[in-house]
Amino acid sequence: MRFGAITRPGDTLTCYGNVKHVYEKDNKRLVEFDLFAEKAPEELVGSGTAILTFHGMKKGGNLWRI
C-alpha cells in the first residue's frame, strides 16, 4: 500500500479492499485485490493492490468457492 497523504500517530484509519480478479496461473489459484485506506469518510490517504494465493479453492460453474 502506498500512502499519498500524511497520517500521524493517533489517526484512525479505515482500510478495505475489493476483489478485482480471480484467476489461475501455473496451477495456482490467485485473487487480486484493490486496497484502500481512508482517514475520514471520502478522504483517501492510501491505495494499493495485493495478490493472494488461496489453497483449497475450487471452481464451481462461474464461481470460486473455498
Image: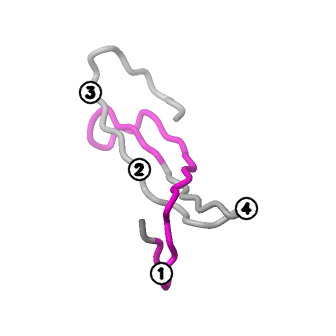
How far apart marks 3 and 4 lie (CA) works out to: 40 Å
As helix, strand or loop, the secondary structure at mark 3 comes to loop
Q: Upstream in the sequence, badge 4 or badge 1?
A: 4
Q: Position of residue 37 (x, y in %)?
A: 39, 38
How packed mark 2 is, by other alpha carbons closer than 10 Å (few <14, some 14-19, many 20 or more), is some
How far apart marks 1 and 3 lie (CA) works out to: 39 Å
The reply to whether discs 1 and 3 touch (Cβ–Cβ < 8 Å) is no
Residue 60 is marked as 1
Q: Position of residue 45 (x, y in %)?
A: 42, 33
For the point 54% across and 32% down, the residue is: 2
How far apart marks 2 and 1 lie (CA) works out to: 24 Å
For the point 49% across and 29% down, the residue is: 3
Residue holding disc 3: 12
How far apart marks 4 and 1 lie (CA) works out to: 19 Å
For the point 55% across and 64% down, the residue is: 21
As helix, strand or loop, the secondary structure at mark 1 comes to strand
Q: Which residues are magenta?
A: 35-64
Residue holding disc 2: 17
Residue holding disc 4: 26
Q: Amino acid under label 2?
A: Gly
